[in-house]
Amino acid sequence: MAAPRTKEQTLAWLKTVSGELATATLKRLEDTLSWYGDMPPGRRSAVGMVAQNGITSFIHWYDDPSSTPWIAADVFGAAPRELLRSVSLTQTLQLIKVTVEVVEERVKGKDESLREAILLYSREIAFAAADVYARAAEARGLWDARLEALVVDSILSGEYDDELPSRIAALGWHGHGEVSVLVGTAPKMLDVDMLRRTARHLDSDVLIGVQGSRLVLVIGRSTPAASAPVEEGGTPRVTFLEIAKALEPGFGDGYLILGIEVASLVEASRSAKAALAGFAVARSWRNAPRPALADDLLPERALAGDPLARSTLINRIYKPLQAHSTELLGTLWCYLDNGRSLEATARELFVHPNTVRYRLKRVSEVIGWDATGARESLILQAALIVGSIAETEHLPRRRSTH
């Protein structure tokens, strides 16, 4: 029976067969791991280098076990940085497993203490690999958070530049359809993952930004309305208001305002301005729902000097009614001035109350707001006031005779 090898003899033998082990490992990788064979030559070479470094590093560690804790840094240090982005942690662990199997097979029956050393070293390598990926993920997460905050700030300010599309793409934005901005109070403990999961469940994506005490969500649809107006089975797809209601638990106490729906992320600043303006005056609506639409706060926003609210009242209510029928416009004026009384309006206009009902129904069909509702009648009255003021401002001034 042969005498047991000394550590020096085992070490010398390992150095002799290291090249053979590396070659066998690369062959096994190609035979057993499909993702390795599918890689471009340069990247495959980098992965092979990691495997070879693992074998070399093990030999050095076997000679000096005191280097155990971070010896794996040498293994991954030679790989290009992009390797961490193209090879997952699961694939790295598969790589370690194959390398260990090849080495174990080669040393089988040589020295039991050597086999134990291989198992101990492979465990250290696996832990070190997890640490490398965790650090990379943490750095990536911090970078993504800063980039996301920058993108949200650009949207809120409306200051776009040529780099914005690439920044959005770098964040992995999945929204390709309509966009709306949701503004509320930031909670004490913000659960970003919950907000993203909720949005994905509703076929949407979100960009998240915190500005002081405010939490801002840019909500985007994964598909435009034109390409997917109805979900499978004939059910209308979820509205932005329904998405906002689902996201509501992720906000702190206080008002929650949903901006107008716009066609794309490029126009998101319009929605953001409406939401921020609505959030600023929301306390003036005593029974404001949560969430509330920014356009339901048009009167308060206009009184606060919001030019977007003023133009919306004029262009979406006053001008369409004026262009459609001065009769409808006059009936609406009269109905609102008479405290929404059908009989009083009918008496003033010398018509039957049913005629007033019909005209109010036509008003609702033309502009989408119902004058018989308390909140909507306030919006319509504000539109009539702002619209008439705007007309007066554009009337030609009389020349002085002096």
Image (cartoon, helix red, strand yellow):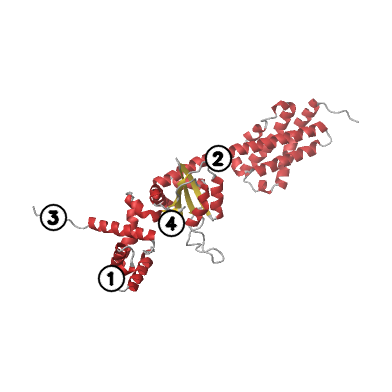
Q: Say if 23 sits above or below 247 in the image.
A: above
Q: What's the mark number on residue 140?
A: 2
Give the distance between the C-alpha atoms of the residues marked 2 and 3, in whole angstroms: 68 Å
**Which is more N-terminal, label 1 or label 2?**
2
| Residue that carries the numbered disc 4 in the rendered image | 263
Front label number (2 vs 3): 3
Q: In the rendered structure, which amino acid carries the disc numbered 1?
A: Arg
The residue that label 3 is drawn on is 399
Q: Which amino acid lies under the numbered mark 3 shown in the image of this protein?
A: Arg
| Tally of numbered discs | 4
The reply, left or right, for residue 172 in relation to residue 101 is left
- On the image, numbered disc 1 is attached to which residue? 347
Q: Looking at the image, is 396 positioned above or below residue 362?
A: above
Q: Is residue 366 left or right of residue 238?
A: left
Q: Earlier in the sequence, mark 1 or mark 4?
A: 4
Cα distance between the residues tagged 1 and 4: 45 Å
- Residue at left 67%, top 40%? 48
Q: Amino acid at mark 2?
A: Arg
Taking 118 as reference, is 362 left or right?
left
